[in-house]
Image (cartoon, grey):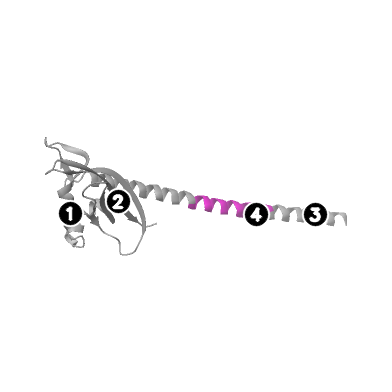
């Protein structure tokens, strides 16, 4: 009878150890899953931030927008007002226009808003919204808008709305 009780106690101990082990295992898997989901979300967000920054840098270097000083030198962070007006007047739904700039600007909207000046306008340089709405990442960059006829500079904000899939 005594060996029977010892066996029952050992069996109960083994069952308790197995239950505790399974509980720790389930808790560990749940914790690891939540951690992985957060980490992958953060990495995805960082990747999209880099992609949007890359698109913004490419836009800043576009010769179609760059302004030249009176000496013929390219100015940093400066767009030519009349070049911007021409791109603003283009029909952004034309496939040729979108195809020409797609490799640079991808699926995004690029606009230029003047600040506290006589112009006071918002120019849409490029607009290619995806068919299926994605998440949007907005980046802004201060730039100059140069009027070569009047030789005046205006402050403006270059705004990039970058569309991406989560």
Q: Seen from this angle, which residue lies furthest bottom?
A: 131
Query: Helix, strand, or loop for circle 3?
Result: helix
**154 or 23: nearer the eye?**
154
Judging depth in this view, the residue of 41 and 116 nearest the camera is 116
Q: Secondary structure at mark 4?
A: helix
Q: Earlier in the sequence, mark 4 or mark 1?
A: 4
Give the residue at x 69% y 55%.
19
Residue situated in front as seen by the camera: 16 or 38: 38
CA gap between label 4 and label 2 equals: 49 Å
Label 2 secondary element: strand
Query: Along the horizontal axis of the image, is 7 left or right of 38?
Result: right
> Any mark on residue 9, and which?
3
Q: Nearer the viewer, mark 4 or mark 2?
A: 2
Q: Earlier in the sequence, mark 3 or mark 4?
A: 3
Question: Where are the magenta residues, as a range?
Answer: 20-37
Please state the horizontal and vertical placement of residue 33, each as a whole percent of the image: 53, 53
Q: Nearer the viewer, mark 2 or mark 3?
A: 2
What quarter of the picture does the C terminus occupy?
A: bottom left
Q: Which corner quadrant of the image does residue 15 belong to?
A: bottom right
Horizontal and vertical percent position of residue 62: 20, 46
Looking at the image, which residue is at 23% across and 55% down? 126
- Residue position marked by numbered label 1 in the rendering: 87
Above/below status of 98 relative to 50: below
Furthest-right residue in view? 1
Location of residue 132 (image quadrant): bottom left
Q: Which mark is residue 160?
A: 2
């Amino acid at each position: 009878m005594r060996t029977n009780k010892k066996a029952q106690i050992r069996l109960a101990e083994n069952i308790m150890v197995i239950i505790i082990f399974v509980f720790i295992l389930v808790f560990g898997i749940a914790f690891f899953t939540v951690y992985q989901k957060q980490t992958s979300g953060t990495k995805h967000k960082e990747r999209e931030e880099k992609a949007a920054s890359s698109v913004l840098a490419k836009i800043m270097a576009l010769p179609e927008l760059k302004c030249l000083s009176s000496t013929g030198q390219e100015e940093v962070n400066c767009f030519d007002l009349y070049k911007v007006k021409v791109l603003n007047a283009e029909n952004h739904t034309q496939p040729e226009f979108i195809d020409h700039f797609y490799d640079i600007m991808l699926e995004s909207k690029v606009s230029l808003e003047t600040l506290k000046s006589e112009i006071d306008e918002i120019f849409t340089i490029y607009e290619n919204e995806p068919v299926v709405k994605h998440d949007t990442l907005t980046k802004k960059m201060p730039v100059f808008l140069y009027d070569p006829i009047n030789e005046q500079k205006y402050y403006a904000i270059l705004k990039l709305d970058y569309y991406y899939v989560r």
